[in-house]
Image (cartoon, rainbow, N blue to C red):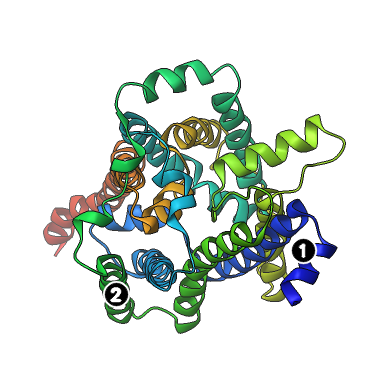
Amino acid sequence: MMFETLFDQFSTGEIAAIIGLAIGLIFGIFAQQSRFCLRAACVEFWRGQTGKKFAIWLLAFGAAMLGTQYFIEMGAIDIGQVRQLNNTGSMSGAIIGGLLFGGGMVLAGGCASRLLVLSATGNMRTMVAGLVVTIVAQASLRGGLSPLREEISSWWLVDGSARSFASWLPPHGGLLLGVVFMGLALWMANRSGINKWWGFAAVITGLSVALGWLLTSWHAANSFDIVPVKSVSFTGSSADTLMGLINQPTLPLSFDIGLVPGVFIGSLLAALATREFQWQKFTADSGFTRFFAGAALMGFGGMLAGGCAVGAGVTGGVMLVITAWVALFSMWIGAGIMDWLVDRKADEAKAAVEAAKRAAEVMPQFAKAPEIVQAG
Protein backbone atom coordinates (compact mmCIF):
# COMPACT_ATOMS: atom_id res chain seq x y z
CA MET A 1 0.00 0.00 0.00
CA MET A 2 2.83 2.40 0.84
CA PHE A 3 4.48 1.78 -2.53
CA GLU A 4 1.17 2.25 -4.37
CA THR A 5 0.73 5.61 -2.62
CA LEU A 6 4.27 6.58 -3.58
CA PHE A 7 3.68 5.81 -7.24
CA ASP A 8 0.35 7.67 -7.14
CA GLN A 9 1.90 10.82 -5.68
CA PHE A 10 5.09 11.00 -7.75
CA SER A 11 5.83 10.48 -11.44
CA THR A 12 8.35 7.93 -12.69
CA GLY A 13 10.92 10.66 -13.33
CA GLU A 14 10.43 12.20 -9.89
CA ILE A 15 10.94 8.87 -8.13
CA ALA A 16 14.06 8.20 -10.22
CA ALA A 17 15.44 11.64 -9.37
CA ILE A 18 14.72 11.14 -5.66
CA ILE A 19 16.56 7.81 -5.73
CA GLY A 20 19.48 9.43 -7.58
CA LEU A 21 19.58 12.32 -5.11
CA ALA A 22 19.62 9.95 -2.12
CA ILE A 23 22.39 7.79 -3.61
CA GLY A 24 24.32 10.92 -4.58
CA LEU A 25 24.12 12.35 -1.07
CA ILE A 26 25.42 9.12 0.46
CA PHE A 27 28.21 8.78 -2.10
CA GLY A 28 29.20 12.46 -1.84
CA ILE A 29 29.36 12.53 1.96
CA PHE A 30 31.35 9.34 2.38
CA ALA A 31 33.56 9.65 -0.71
CA GLN A 32 34.66 13.04 0.60
CA GLN A 33 35.28 11.72 4.08
CA SER A 34 37.09 8.55 2.98
CA ARG A 35 39.34 10.29 0.40
CA PHE A 36 38.18 7.65 -2.09
CA CYS A 37 40.22 8.15 -5.26
CA LEU A 38 41.36 5.73 -7.97
CA ARG A 39 44.15 8.06 -9.07
CA ALA A 40 45.70 8.11 -5.60
CA ALA A 41 45.40 4.33 -5.34
CA CYS A 42 47.04 3.83 -8.74
CA VAL A 43 49.96 6.13 -8.01
CA GLU A 44 50.55 4.49 -4.66
CA PHE A 45 50.37 1.02 -6.23
CA TRP A 46 52.73 1.71 -9.13
CA ARG A 47 55.28 3.30 -6.83
CA GLY A 48 55.33 0.15 -4.72
CA GLN A 49 53.78 1.84 -1.70
CA THR A 50 50.46 0.00 -1.39
CA GLY A 51 49.11 1.57 1.77
CA LYS A 52 46.17 3.65 2.93
CA LYS A 53 45.02 5.06 -0.42
CA PHE A 54 45.07 1.66 -2.09
CA ALA A 55 43.28 0.12 0.91
CA ILE A 56 40.55 2.78 0.79
CA TRP A 57 39.83 2.11 -2.88
CA LEU A 58 39.85 -1.65 -2.29
CA LEU A 59 37.44 -1.32 0.66
CA ALA A 60 34.97 0.62 -1.49
CA PHE A 61 35.28 -1.83 -4.39
CA GLY A 62 34.99 -4.86 -2.10
CA ALA A 63 31.90 -3.46 -0.36
CA ALA A 64 30.27 -2.63 -3.70
CA MET A 65 31.01 -6.12 -5.04
CA LEU A 66 29.81 -7.92 -1.92
CA GLY A 67 26.65 -5.85 -1.57
CA THR A 68 25.68 -6.03 -5.24
CA GLN A 69 26.27 -9.75 -5.56
CA TYR A 70 24.34 -10.40 -2.34
CA PHE A 71 21.33 -8.52 -3.70
CA ILE A 72 21.59 -10.49 -6.96
CA GLU A 73 21.67 -13.77 -5.01
CA MET A 74 18.55 -12.68 -3.10
CA GLY A 75 16.77 -11.90 -6.38
CA ALA A 76 16.46 -8.20 -5.53
CA ILE A 77 18.37 -7.07 -8.64
CA ASP A 78 17.17 -8.21 -12.06
CA ILE A 79 20.35 -8.56 -14.13
CA GLY A 80 18.18 -9.17 -17.18
CA GLN A 81 17.47 -5.42 -17.22
CA VAL A 82 21.08 -4.28 -16.80
CA ARG A 83 22.10 -2.56 -20.04
CA GLN A 84 25.78 -3.50 -19.82
CA LEU A 85 24.89 -7.19 -19.71
CA ASN A 86 22.45 -7.15 -22.61
CA ASN A 87 23.76 -4.68 -25.19
CA THR A 88 26.78 -4.96 -27.46
CA GLY A 89 29.95 -3.62 -25.91
CA SER A 90 33.30 -2.50 -27.25
CA MET A 91 36.50 -4.16 -26.13
CA SER A 92 38.61 -1.74 -28.19
CA GLY A 93 36.80 1.16 -26.56
CA ALA A 94 37.38 -0.31 -23.11
CA ILE A 95 41.12 -0.72 -23.74
CA ILE A 96 41.90 2.56 -25.49
CA GLY A 97 39.38 4.59 -23.51
CA GLY A 98 40.64 3.12 -20.25
CA LEU A 99 44.25 3.98 -21.09
CA LEU A 100 43.31 7.57 -21.98
CA PHE A 101 41.14 7.98 -18.89
CA GLY A 102 43.84 6.57 -16.60
CA GLY A 103 46.47 8.92 -17.98
CA GLY A 104 44.08 11.85 -17.83
CA MET A 105 43.16 11.37 -14.18
CA VAL A 106 46.84 11.51 -13.21
CA LEU A 107 47.23 14.85 -14.99
CA ALA A 108 43.95 16.28 -13.69
CA GLY A 109 44.52 15.22 -10.09
CA GLY A 110 41.61 12.79 -9.84
CA CYS A 111 38.98 10.82 -11.74
CA ALA A 112 35.60 12.30 -12.72
CA SER A 113 33.96 11.45 -9.38
CA ARG A 114 36.90 12.82 -7.39
CA LEU A 115 36.82 16.09 -9.35
CA LEU A 116 33.12 16.51 -8.54
CA VAL A 117 33.69 15.72 -4.85
CA LEU A 118 36.69 18.06 -4.54
CA SER A 119 34.98 20.90 -6.41
CA ALA A 120 32.34 20.95 -3.66
CA THR A 121 35.08 21.50 -1.07
CA GLY A 122 36.16 24.78 -2.69
CA ASN A 123 38.77 23.46 -5.12
CA MET A 124 38.40 25.69 -8.19
CA ARG A 125 41.04 23.73 -10.11
CA THR A 126 39.01 20.55 -10.00
CA MET A 127 35.80 22.46 -10.75
CA VAL A 128 37.27 23.81 -13.99
CA ALA A 129 38.71 20.39 -14.85
CA GLY A 130 35.31 18.80 -14.16
CA LEU A 131 33.62 21.22 -16.55
CA VAL A 132 36.16 20.34 -19.24
CA VAL A 133 35.53 16.63 -18.66
CA THR A 134 31.79 17.22 -19.06
CA ILE A 135 32.09 19.29 -22.24
CA VAL A 136 34.48 16.85 -23.94
CA ALA A 137 32.31 13.91 -22.85
CA GLN A 138 29.27 15.53 -24.47
CA ALA A 139 31.25 16.22 -27.64
CA SER A 140 32.32 12.58 -27.64
CA LEU A 141 28.78 11.32 -27.14
CA ARG A 142 26.82 13.47 -29.57
CA GLY A 143 29.13 16.15 -30.94
CA GLY A 144 32.19 16.57 -33.11
CA LEU A 145 34.20 13.82 -31.41
CA SER A 146 31.45 11.20 -31.70
CA PRO A 147 32.58 9.90 -35.16
CA LEU A 148 36.06 9.18 -33.77
CA ARG A 149 34.59 7.48 -30.70
CA GLU A 150 32.29 5.35 -32.84
CA GLU A 151 35.14 4.38 -35.18
CA ILE A 152 37.42 3.21 -32.36
CA SER A 153 34.55 1.42 -30.64
CA SER A 154 33.77 -0.54 -33.81
CA TRP A 155 37.20 -2.17 -34.00
CA TRP A 156 36.39 -4.94 -31.50
CA LEU A 157 32.78 -5.52 -30.48
CA VAL A 158 31.45 -8.01 -27.93
CA ASP A 159 27.87 -9.34 -27.90
CA GLY A 160 25.80 -8.64 -24.83
CA SER A 161 25.53 -12.34 -24.05
CA ALA A 162 29.33 -12.55 -23.88
CA ARG A 163 29.89 -9.48 -21.71
CA SER A 164 29.46 -11.26 -18.36
CA PHE A 165 31.92 -13.73 -16.88
CA ALA A 166 29.48 -14.87 -14.19
CA SER A 167 29.05 -18.16 -16.06
CA TRP A 168 32.79 -18.82 -15.71
CA LEU A 169 32.50 -18.85 -11.92
CA PRO A 170 31.27 -21.68 -9.67
CA PRO A 171 27.82 -21.48 -8.04
CA HIS A 172 27.55 -18.30 -5.96
CA GLY A 173 30.87 -17.30 -7.55
CA GLY A 174 30.04 -13.60 -7.64
CA LEU A 175 29.25 -13.55 -3.94
CA LEU A 176 32.41 -15.53 -3.17
CA LEU A 177 34.41 -13.05 -5.25
CA GLY A 178 32.94 -10.23 -3.19
CA VAL A 179 33.94 -12.00 0.02
CA VAL A 180 37.50 -12.43 -1.30
CA PHE A 181 37.83 -8.77 -2.29
CA MET A 182 36.37 -7.60 1.01
CA GLY A 183 38.66 -9.90 2.99
CA LEU A 184 41.70 -8.64 1.07
CA ALA A 185 40.57 -5.04 1.60
CA LEU A 186 40.19 -5.52 5.36
CA TRP A 187 43.64 -7.12 5.54
CA MET A 188 45.16 -4.24 3.57
CA ALA A 189 43.38 -1.69 5.77
CA ASN A 190 44.65 -3.35 8.93
CA ARG A 191 48.19 -3.63 7.58
CA SER A 192 48.34 0.01 6.56
CA GLY A 193 46.88 1.24 9.84
CA ILE A 194 44.07 3.10 8.13
CA ASN A 195 41.95 5.54 10.11
CA LYS A 196 38.83 3.64 11.21
CA TRP A 197 36.50 6.45 10.19
CA TRP A 198 38.07 6.58 6.72
CA GLY A 199 37.67 2.82 6.44
CA PHE A 200 34.03 2.94 7.48
CA ALA A 201 33.37 5.81 5.05
CA ALA A 202 35.04 3.83 2.22
CA VAL A 203 32.76 0.86 2.90
CA ILE A 204 29.64 3.07 2.83
CA THR A 205 30.90 4.65 -0.41
CA GLY A 206 31.03 1.20 -1.98
CA LEU A 207 27.66 0.17 -0.54
CA SER A 208 26.06 3.24 -2.13
CA VAL A 209 26.86 1.66 -5.51
CA ALA A 210 25.10 -1.56 -4.49
CA LEU A 211 22.18 0.46 -3.13
CA GLY A 212 21.90 2.27 -6.46
CA TRP A 213 21.54 -1.05 -8.30
CA LEU A 214 19.01 -2.24 -5.71
CA LEU A 215 16.74 0.82 -5.74
CA THR A 216 16.70 1.32 -9.51
CA SER A 217 15.91 -2.37 -9.94
CA TRP A 218 13.07 -2.04 -7.42
CA HIS A 219 11.80 1.03 -9.27
CA ALA A 220 11.89 -0.77 -12.62
CA ALA A 221 10.01 -3.75 -11.19
CA ASN A 222 7.21 -1.61 -9.74
CA SER A 223 6.81 1.07 -12.39
CA PHE A 224 4.48 0.94 -15.38
CA ASP A 225 7.07 2.90 -17.38
CA ILE A 226 10.45 1.74 -18.63
CA VAL A 227 13.05 2.56 -15.98
CA PRO A 228 16.80 2.03 -16.57
CA VAL A 229 18.45 -0.23 -14.00
CA LYS A 230 21.72 1.53 -13.19
CA SER A 231 23.90 2.91 -10.44
CA VAL A 232 26.61 5.49 -9.81
CA SER A 233 28.40 6.86 -12.88
CA PHE A 234 29.66 10.35 -13.69
CA THR A 235 31.00 10.97 -17.19
CA GLY A 236 27.74 10.58 -19.09
CA SER A 237 25.62 11.70 -16.13
CA SER A 238 27.49 14.97 -15.73
CA ALA A 239 27.40 15.64 -19.47
CA ASP A 240 23.64 15.10 -19.69
CA THR A 241 23.01 17.24 -16.59
CA LEU A 242 25.13 20.15 -17.84
CA MET A 243 23.73 20.07 -21.37
CA GLY A 244 20.21 19.87 -19.97
CA LEU A 245 20.80 22.99 -17.89
CA ILE A 246 22.18 24.81 -20.94
CA ASN A 247 19.73 23.69 -23.61
CA GLN A 248 16.40 23.14 -21.82
CA PRO A 249 14.24 25.42 -19.64
CA THR A 250 13.17 22.40 -17.57
CA LEU A 251 15.15 19.22 -16.99
CA PRO A 252 13.52 15.84 -17.65
CA LEU A 253 13.87 14.16 -14.28
CA SER A 254 15.91 10.97 -14.06
CA PHE A 255 18.31 9.09 -11.79
CA ASP A 256 21.30 10.96 -13.22
CA ILE A 257 19.67 14.37 -12.73
CA GLY A 258 19.38 13.59 -9.02
CA LEU A 259 22.76 11.86 -8.70
CA VAL A 260 25.13 14.63 -9.81
CA PRO A 261 23.80 17.46 -7.61
CA GLY A 262 23.36 14.94 -4.80
CA VAL A 263 27.07 14.09 -4.85
CA PHE A 264 28.00 17.78 -4.93
CA ILE A 265 25.68 18.69 -2.05
CA GLY A 266 26.77 15.66 0.00
CA SER A 267 30.45 16.49 -0.41
CA LEU A 268 29.80 20.16 0.40
CA LEU A 269 27.90 19.29 3.58
CA ALA A 270 30.64 16.89 4.70
CA ALA A 271 33.36 19.47 4.04
CA LEU A 272 31.49 22.17 5.94
CA ALA A 273 30.67 19.88 8.85
CA THR A 274 34.31 18.83 9.26
CA ARG A 275 35.71 22.31 8.46
CA GLU A 276 37.55 20.99 5.43
CA PHE A 277 36.03 23.51 3.02
CA GLN A 278 38.76 25.75 1.62
CA TRP A 279 38.95 27.85 -1.53
CA GLN A 280 41.77 26.69 -3.78
CA LYS A 281 42.69 28.24 -7.11
CA PHE A 282 45.23 27.82 -9.86
CA THR A 283 48.77 28.88 -8.98
CA ALA A 284 52.04 29.17 -10.86
CA ASP A 285 53.01 25.75 -9.51
CA SER A 286 49.75 23.96 -10.26
CA GLY A 287 49.35 25.44 -13.74
CA PHE A 288 46.36 25.11 -16.05
CA THR A 289 47.58 23.20 -19.10
CA ARG A 290 48.06 19.98 -17.17
CA PHE A 291 44.52 20.04 -15.72
CA PHE A 292 42.99 20.93 -19.07
CA ALA A 293 44.81 18.15 -20.94
CA GLY A 294 44.00 15.57 -18.29
CA ALA A 295 40.33 16.53 -18.19
CA ALA A 296 40.05 16.34 -21.98
CA LEU A 297 41.60 12.85 -21.98
CA MET A 298 39.15 11.75 -19.29
CA GLY A 299 36.15 13.18 -21.10
CA PHE A 300 36.89 11.34 -24.34
CA GLY A 301 38.33 8.25 -22.67
CA GLY A 302 35.39 7.88 -20.29
CA MET A 303 32.80 7.93 -23.09
CA LEU A 304 34.93 5.55 -25.17
CA ALA A 305 35.42 3.13 -22.27
CA GLY A 306 31.73 3.09 -21.41
CA GLY A 307 32.12 4.93 -18.14
CA CYS A 308 34.48 6.58 -15.68
CA ALA A 309 36.59 5.03 -12.93
CA VAL A 310 33.42 4.58 -10.87
CA GLY A 311 30.84 4.08 -13.63
CA ALA A 312 32.80 1.43 -15.52
CA GLY A 313 35.45 0.46 -13.00
CA VAL A 314 33.25 -0.07 -9.93
CA THR A 315 29.58 0.07 -10.95
CA GLY A 316 30.13 -2.06 -14.05
CA GLY A 317 32.85 -4.15 -12.47
CA VAL A 318 30.70 -5.39 -9.59
CA MET A 319 28.17 -6.61 -12.18
CA LEU A 320 30.96 -8.82 -13.59
CA VAL A 321 30.89 -7.03 -16.94
CA ILE A 322 34.00 -8.07 -18.90
CA THR A 323 34.40 -4.77 -20.73
CA ALA A 324 34.19 -2.93 -17.39
CA TRP A 325 36.99 -5.03 -15.93
CA VAL A 326 39.09 -4.48 -19.07
CA ALA A 327 38.43 -0.74 -18.84
CA LEU A 328 39.39 -0.70 -15.15
CA PHE A 329 42.59 -2.65 -15.81
CA SER A 330 43.44 -0.28 -18.67
CA MET A 331 42.88 2.71 -16.37
CA TRP A 332 45.41 1.30 -13.91
CA ILE A 333 47.90 0.79 -16.75
CA GLY A 334 47.30 4.25 -18.21
CA ALA A 335 47.70 5.88 -14.80
CA GLY A 336 50.97 4.02 -14.18
CA ILE A 337 52.41 5.04 -17.54
CA MET A 338 51.43 8.70 -17.16
CA ASP A 339 52.76 8.84 -13.60
CA TRP A 340 56.08 7.38 -14.77
CA LEU A 341 56.35 9.72 -17.76
CA VAL A 342 55.35 12.93 -16.01
CA ASP A 343 55.36 12.91 -12.22
CA ARG A 344 57.89 10.26 -11.26
CA LYS A 345 60.56 11.54 -13.65
CA ALA A 346 59.90 15.08 -12.44
CA ASP A 347 60.20 13.97 -8.82
CA GLU A 348 63.46 12.15 -9.59
CA ALA A 349 64.84 15.21 -11.39
CA LYS A 350 63.85 17.45 -8.47
CA ALA A 351 65.53 15.06 -6.02
CA ALA A 352 68.69 15.06 -8.14
CA VAL A 353 68.79 18.89 -8.16
CA GLU A 354 68.33 19.01 -4.39
CA ALA A 355 71.09 16.44 -3.93
CA ALA A 356 73.40 18.50 -6.13
CA LYS A 357 72.65 21.62 -4.10
CA ARG A 358 73.44 19.81 -0.86
CA ALA A 359 76.68 18.52 -2.36
CA ALA A 360 77.62 22.03 -3.49
CA GLU A 361 77.06 23.32 0.04
CA VAL A 362 79.33 20.63 1.50
CA MET A 363 82.17 20.99 -1.06
CA PRO A 364 83.51 24.36 0.21
CA GLN A 365 84.02 22.86 3.66
CA PHE A 366 86.20 20.11 2.17
CA ALA A 367 88.06 22.71 0.12
CA LYS A 368 89.06 24.58 3.31
CA ALA A 369 90.28 21.42 5.05
CA PRO A 370 93.94 21.52 3.74
CA GLU A 371 94.34 25.14 4.84
CA ILE A 372 93.25 24.25 8.35
CA VAL A 373 95.73 21.37 8.53
CA GLN A 374 98.59 23.56 7.19
CA ALA A 375 97.83 26.31 9.67
CA GLY A 376 98.00 23.76 12.48
Q: Residue at 36% of width from left, 22% of height from top?
A: 154
Q: Is residue 365 visible?
A: no
User: Residue 219 sits in which quadrant?
Assistant: bottom right
Placement of 205 over or under 37, stated as above or below:
below
Name the spot of residue 14 as percent of width and height, x first: 77, 56
Q: Residue at 34% of width from left, 47% of height from top?
A: 328
Name the spot of residue 166 as percent of width and height, x first: 27, 56
Mark 1 is surrounded, within 10 Å at the Cα level, by few (under 14), some (14 to 19) or many (20 or more) other residues, namely: some
Viewport quadrant of the N terminus: bottom right
State the residue position of label 1: 7
The disc label shown at residue 59, or none:
none
State the residue position of label 2: 179
Q: Is residue 37 left or right of residue 47?
A: right
Q: Is residue 277 left or right of residue 144?
A: right
Name the spot of residue 341 as percent of width and height, x first: 30, 36
Q: Residue at 33% of width from left, 54% of height from top?
A: 320
Judging from the image, what secondary structure is the residue with disc 2 in? helix
